[in-house]
Amino acid sequence: MAEVHIIGQIVGASHFPKHSLFCKWQIHYGNGWRLISGLKEGQTHVDNPQYDEKAYWSHPVDIHFATKGIQGWPKFHVQVYHLDHWGRSELYGYGFCHVPASAGTHIVDCVTWRPVGTLRDQIRQYFVGGGPQLKNIELAYCGYDRYRLQTETMGIVHMELGIILRHFDKFGVEFKFM
């Protein structure tokens, strides 16, 4: 079987409206893929930078897959949360990005968004906190019904990923570099 090894880190996040952020992440892949080793989900610590706009997590990622084809190529799904001074976590954004399909080191920026809701939801969010969240989390990375949602752009999650590909040539998959 062909193999894909993903080694790297979730570096941090930037351009969010408030500090004190943490990230929950998952990696999704097709039915033809098998997880050999590593975790397919995790959560970073909370970073509350005092003097910088960017939150730094440096959360390690080490995942090893086996596959017989490229259909269902892995993608990261992230959820960024803000932790307020009362200890409540508020959703700040959903996002997803595909794992790069070429070997080497890659810098990946995952743009996030969140549902806006009605005017009543926005007023409630301003005074009480919280806000609208997705009932079906698959909408964040599948896309079909997501385009009917009213959303707003949030910040960016930064990743550094090293990709190692093995035995793809034995299964007739060629990667051409330009």
Image (cartoon, rainbow, N blue to C red):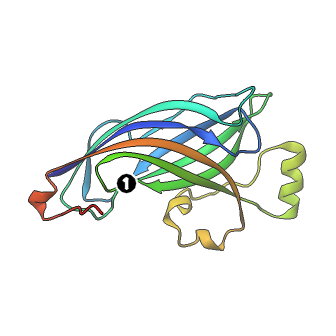
Which residue does the image show at 83% across and 57% down from the upper left? 121
Which residue does the image show at 62% across and 53% down from the upper left? 112
Q: Residue furthest left?
A: 170
Identify the element where label 1 is drawn: loop
Q: Indicate the quadrant where residue 62 lies.
A: top left
Along the viewing direction, whichever of 158 and 22 lies nearer the viewer = 158
Say how many tags the image has.
1
| Residue 120 at x, y percent in the picture | 88, 60
Q: Quadrant of the C terminus?
A: bottom left
- Going by the numbered disc 1, the residue's amino acid type is Pro
Which residue does the image show at 42% across and 48% down from the upper left? 27
Task: Bin the neighbour count of mark 1 within 10 Å (Cα to Cα): few under 14, some 14-19, many 20 and up.
Answer: some
| Residue 143 at x, y percent in the picture | 53, 68
Q: Is residue 87 left or right of residue 28?
A: right
Q: Indicate the quadrant where residue 53 lies.
A: top right
Which residue does the image show at 26% across and 62% down from the upper left? 70
Badge 1 is on which residue? 100
Q: Is residue 73 left or right of residue 85?
A: left
Q: Residue furthest front?
A: 178
| Residue 119 at x, y percent in the picture | 87, 63
Q: Is residue 92 left or right of residue 9?
A: right
| Residue 154 at x, y percent in the picture | 69, 52
Up/down of 47 relative to 105, above or below? above
Up/down of 40 relative to 77, above or below? above
Along the viewing direction, whichever of 150 and 159 lies nearer the viewer = 159
Q: Is residue 153 left or right of residue 106?
A: right
